[in-house]
């Protein structure tokens, strides 16, 4: 059960990392769009 819990935590961390990366990519895209708008 301890190993399963650790794996679950790892999956949550991976998901959070993917979400943060997606957010950073969205920020870069939005900044590029804003520069194009200018």
Image: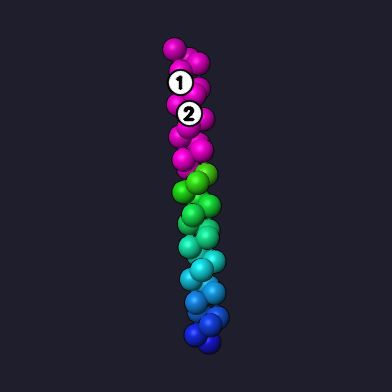
Secondary structure category for the residue under label 1:
helix
Q: How many marks?
A: 2
Which numbered marker is on residue 34? 1
Q: Residue at x 52, y 44 (%)?
A: 22
Residue 1 x %, y %: 53, 87
Q: Residue at x 46, y 40 (%)?
A: 24
Residue 30 x %, y %: 48, 28
The extreme bottom residue here reads 1
State the extent of the magenta-drawn residues as a range.
23-38
Q: State if disc 1 and disc 2 touch (CB < 8 Å).
A: yes
Q: Badge 2: how crowded within 10 Å, few (<14), some, or many (20+)?
A: few
> Is the residue 17 above or below the residue 28 in the image?
below
The extreme top residue here reads 38
> Is the residue 35 above or below the residue 19 in the image?
above
Which numbered marker is on residue 30? 2
Residue at mark 2 to residue at mark 1: CA–CA distance: 6 Å
Secondary structure category for the residue under label 2:
helix
């Amino acid at each position: 059960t301890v190993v399963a819990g650790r794996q679950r935590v790892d999956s949550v961390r991976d998901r959070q990392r993917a979400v943060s990366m997606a957010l950073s990519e969205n920020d870069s895209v939005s900044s590029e769009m804003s520069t194009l708008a200018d």
